[in-house]
Image (cartoon, grey):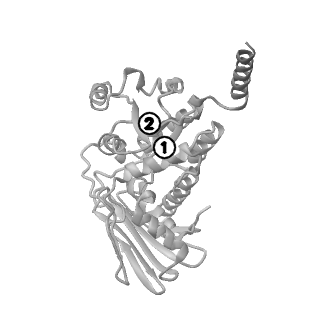
């Protein structure tokens, strides 16, 4: 009896100590994968993000948000998405009640990024937002503030900053293996065929045009290659097809000036296929061509180094990196502040082009 009493007392003490001092074993067990909901089921979600999520290690496609009911059965059948994880734009806020969804990835026309990124943050979900982050710096700041206020992480979908050759170029901005940069040119674009006058890339109020769509690749590349922030810009717009590009820019060229005197040049276009980062330094040079491509980034240096295309999936790597930042509560690789800096430059480029290419300060 004495031994039995001692056993019961010890057991009760252990149970009380465990309850008061430590979380339960269930709370200690981390979630193996984060559940992701894609907001907007257009080309980028359908053909790139959804397939990439099947290749990730740390996240999985668990939900969709769409305004097109006909798409729902197709996605459910292909990815096993349950009825309870299907939302539309009117009821998306109720995703707050869904523990299977950890992250909301906003993949909508640019003018809608702010609204739905804020809605996701207020639902208590981590936010991944496609680039460009928003239409202007004020919208970017509102997204950042909403995420901070709701204590959720915000990552911007700059897949290139997760790609190995690009990360090497970013490292060179600090180590300067070829000396200081003396000239830099970044170009990105493709031949857009038009065809649909109401397609959002042709609509100014939806954030259409080459600069928002492709120009941010050039701006971001110039910034991460130099490791510097531009202080002024001069820019101009051109069009070869005014019947198609009535309201948005078809071609934009620009110069970015830095405090150290460097002037970098850039071009973005819906009129031609261009894709290169060309860098000249004091004691050598290097380039990436293509500098952004779903099928790989590659280049060369003046001393014979070949930067071979990485065979991995860029979107999967991006989402895994962002998932790990959430799971480890660490700093994200591409923050909202980073996305906003590009938009500040975009807005200054538009201002300069509207004023005949006058040099405009970037503030």
Q: Nearer the viewer, residue 195 or 281?
A: 281
Answer whether residue 325 is visible to the viewer in this image. Answer: yes
Q: Earlier in the sequence, mark 2 or mark 1?
A: 2
| x and y, in percent, of residue 296 in the image | 31, 61
| x and y, in percent, of residue 12 in the image | 72, 20
- Left or right: 130 with respect to 69? right
Secondary structure of the residue carrying numbered label 1: strand
Residue 185 sits above or below residue 269 on the image? below
Number of the front mark, 2 or 1: 2
Q: Nearer the viewer, residue 337 or 261?
A: 337
Residue 14 sits above or below residue 302 on the image? above
- The residue located at (27%, 62%) in the rendering is 272
Residue farthest along the top direction in this orientation: 1
The mark found on residue 36 in the picture is: 2
Label pair 2/1, CB-CB below 8 angstroms? yes
- Left or right: 38 with respect to 176? left
- Left or right: 125 with respect to 56? right
């Amino acid at each position: 009896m004495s031994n039995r009493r001692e056993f019961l007392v010890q057991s009760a003490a252990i149970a009380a100590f465990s309850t008061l001092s430590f979380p339960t074993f269930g709370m200690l067990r981390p979630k193996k994968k984060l559940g992701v909901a894609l907001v907007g089921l257009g080309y980028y979600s359908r053909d790139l993000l959804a397939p990439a999520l099947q290749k990730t290690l740390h996240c999985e496609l668990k939900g969709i948000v769409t305004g097109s009911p006909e798409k729902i059965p197709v996605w459910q059948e292909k990815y096993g998405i349950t009825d309870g994880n299907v939302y539309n734009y009117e009821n998306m806020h109720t995703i707050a009640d869904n523990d299977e969804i950890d992250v909301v990835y906003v993949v909508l026309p640019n003018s809608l990024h702010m609204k739905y990124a804020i809605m996701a943050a207020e639902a208590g979900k981590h936010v991944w937002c496609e680039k460009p982050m928003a239409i202007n710096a004020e919208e970017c700041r509102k997204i950042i503030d909403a995420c901070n206020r709701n204590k959720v992480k915000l990552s911007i979908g700059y897949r290139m900053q997760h790609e190995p050759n690009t990360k090497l170029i970013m490292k060179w901005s600090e180590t300067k293996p070829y000396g200081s940069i003396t000239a830099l040119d970044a170009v990105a674009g493709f031949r857009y065929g038009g065809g649909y006058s109401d397609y959002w890339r042709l609509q100014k109020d939806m954030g259409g045009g080459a600069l928002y769509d492709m120009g941010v690749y050039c701006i971001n590349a110039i910034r991460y290659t130099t490791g510097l922030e531009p202080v002024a810009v001069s820019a101009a717009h051109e069009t070869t097809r005014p019947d198609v590009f009535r309201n948005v820019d078809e071609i934009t060229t620009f110069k970015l000036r830095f405090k150290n005197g460097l002037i970098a040049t850039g071009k973005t276009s819906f009129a031609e296929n261009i894709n290169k980062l060309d860098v000249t330094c004091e004691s050598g040079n290097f380039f990436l061509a293509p500098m952004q491509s779903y099928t790989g980034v590659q280049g060369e240096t003046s001393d014979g180094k070949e930067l071979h295309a990485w065979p991995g999936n860029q979107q999967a790597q991006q989402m895994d990196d962002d998932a790990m930042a959430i799971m480890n509560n660490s700093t994200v690789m591409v923050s909202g502040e980073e996305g906003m800096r590009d938009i500040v430059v975009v807005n200054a480029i538009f201002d300069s082009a509207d004023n005949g290419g006058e040099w405009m300060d970037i503030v």
